[in-house]
Each structure stands twice: as C-alpha cells, then as structure tokens.
Amino acid sequence: MSRARKLKILGESAKYDRCNYANYNLDNFLTRKTPGIYNASTRDGCTVPLFKVLMTNKCSNDCRYCVNCNKHRFDRVEFSPEDLTSIFLDYYNNRYVEGLFLSSGINRNAETSMENMVEVARKLRMEHGYKGYIHLKILPGTSHDLIKSAMSLADRVSINMEAATPEGFEELTSTKNYQTDIIRRMKWMKRLGNRKDLAPSGQTTQFIVGATNETDQDILERVDWLYKKLKIRRSYFSSFSPIRDTPLENHEKPHPKRSARLYQADYLLDSYKFHLNELVFDENGNMNSDMDPKYCSAISNPENFPVEVNEASYSELLRVPGIGKVSANRIVKLRKRGKCFNKMKELKDVGVVVSRAEPFIKLNKRYQTTLGV
C-alpha cells in the first residue's frame, strides 16, 4: 500500500484522539490534500496546526466504541518509525505543521507499540535536532521505564481514561483494566512530572461521553479528582459517535450539546475554581444541556446575588454570568485605582456581557434589573 494511502487511513483514524479544547467538532482536518494535518485550538483562541496520526490501526483491544476495535473489519496498516519521521519532517519543513501529536493502536502488545512511538520522538530530537512540540499518547499497560523515556522526549503526554468509573470502563472494554492500565500509569506520570525536564507541559486525558450510562456528575467528579490528586493539565470530552461494524453501532448518540456543557463545567472547576457542589445536576446526575452551567449555578443560588460590583471579591465577580476572568481582573484593578462603577456602559467597556450580568449585580447599591425566571 502506498505511503499516501496509509497516511489517509491513519490520519483519519487519529481524529478520535482529542487535543482540541475550544472546538468540539471532530472535523478539524484542513483538507483532503493534506491528510494528517489538524487544527488544534487552545483555550486562549489560538490555532496550531499539528501533524496528528496513528502509528498503526492494528489493535488487540476490544474497545466497543472505537474505530480500531479488534472486531472491526477494515484495512489495517502501520508506519515504521523511519517512515513516520520522514513524513513529519517533510510537513514541518514545508511549514504545513508546527508540532506532532502521535498515538497508536496496540499491535501485539503495548510495549512494542509504545517503543515505536518513542523511537519516532527520539529520531526527531536526537538525529534531526527537532526542538518543537511533541505530544505522545501513552498506551494503557506501558511500562514505567518506557513512560519515562517518552516523557524525556515529549512536551506533553496523555492516556485516555475513556470512562469516569471502573464500572463504566468495563462497559467499554474487556481487554484493559481501569486501575492498573489507566490510573496506575497516570500516577506514574504525575510523579515523573515533578521533574521539570520530563513532559514540561504535563499530562492530559480524554473521556468518551455517552457511550456508557455514566452521568455528567460521574464524569465531573472524576475530573475534579484528577485536577486535585494528579494535577492533570486538561480534560477532553469526545462525544460518542456510533461506528458501523463495531459493537456499539446501534447505541444512541448523546445530546449534541452535552460535551460542550462538560467543557464549560470543566473550565469552571479548573480555571474559575468553582467547587463541584456549585454545579447543578438533576435527579439523574446530569446538567441541563440547554443551559450554560455557570448561568444555571447562578439562578439556582439566588441567595448569592446580586453582588455589588464595587465591593465584590474577584472570586465573587467570577460567579456572575457575563463576567469572565479578564473583565473581573479589570474591575478589581480599576477599583484599586479609585474607580467607582456607576453605569452599565462602564462595565461593558471592560468586557462584561452586560445583558447576562445585569440581573445578578448592583452598582452603588442600586439594582439594575430583576431576573425574569
């Protein structure tokens, strides 16, 4: 099979591994003429083109949602480390991409497949002097020594949790163990990451949303635990999509906004320092998919509002719908210089979305409007 055909197959298969915070869609590949080039969007709105590909789609695991499930019948191909290194350098030298995101199916065993990915990173760093961004996906079951080797070469590493609970994980696969293959490896990466020369951009993970009976509360409890206990840098949420000829091909898709709401709630926990109990879940443990979780939290806690903009702390301002980190910072800094906010236009000028914030604030003890709910 030609290199171009392999690249098309393995580039397409790689789209299910998330490295993109701001855009929830899978279809981020630039053009069919340049397979494997992927636009990753960061939290601050920047777009970075990455070479995103699998070493192989050959896999011994039976993940029921996955395109590479061992029960799925389709073309199985693989790259050698030499071939993949050559393709990346061609893309990089022609300025098609700025970094590498490399993952793989598990062909035969995790150690051999992981060794091939590490060899690509070694060749790029040691033989070709590449100093740019590398993200290596750590395969479940990889040894401690090989994880350390990967982290010595990569800027960032990640392992897919896929599910928030051991029970949910068992719904997805019978060939991997949640505690030993996933959690234990994440703990190793956390300890190794205490060294600044090992994966300085830290570790991330990914959840498959809607493939199991896990609730939003299950997922966000796990996310909260990961931030507090394992110091992960980011969680990604991939909406389950049925794939023909896989065991879950007839499984229902999740609500189209569910992953987006999880991203928003995750941001509240990680960046806005919300407590988990400030988020609102229904009797089934799920958020309102049609409502921003920050707004939902605000209207469910009326005793906390309205807040006086000229007196509220930074943390209190962050809990007001329509006030983000940038506008909250500006408000606090201007107050320290003696500024007193009297008009909504003054808030608009510092970046507040006044149409959302108005029912939740006071200016100089004056209510601005009432909440029409």
Image (spheres, helix red, strand yellow):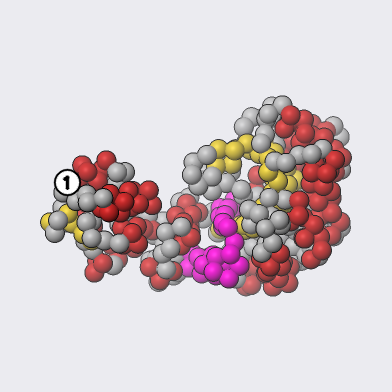
Verify whether residue 240 appears in magenta.
yes
Q: Position of residue 265 (x, y in %)?
A: 44, 59
The picture places residue 133, in percent across and down from the top left corner, at 68, 43
- Quarter that holds the N terminus: top right
Q: Does residue 325 show up magenta in the picture?
A: no
Give neighbour class at mark 1: few <14, some 14-19, many 20+ (Cα, 10 Å): few
Q: What are the residue bounds of the magenta stretch?
A: 215-242
Q: Decide if residue 203 is in sight here.
A: yes
Residue shown at 26%/50% (left/top)?
337
Q: Residue 194, relative to residue 105: is it above or below? A: below
Identity of the residue drawn at 62% across and 73% down: 167
Q: Is residue 20 left or right of residue 193?
A: left
Q: Secondary structure at mark 1?
A: loop
114 and 176: which one is in front?
114
Reading the image, the residue beneath label 1 is 343
- Relative height, residue 232 to residue 329 (above, below): below
Q: Residue at x 35, y 51 (%)?
A: 329
Callout 1 amino acid: Lys
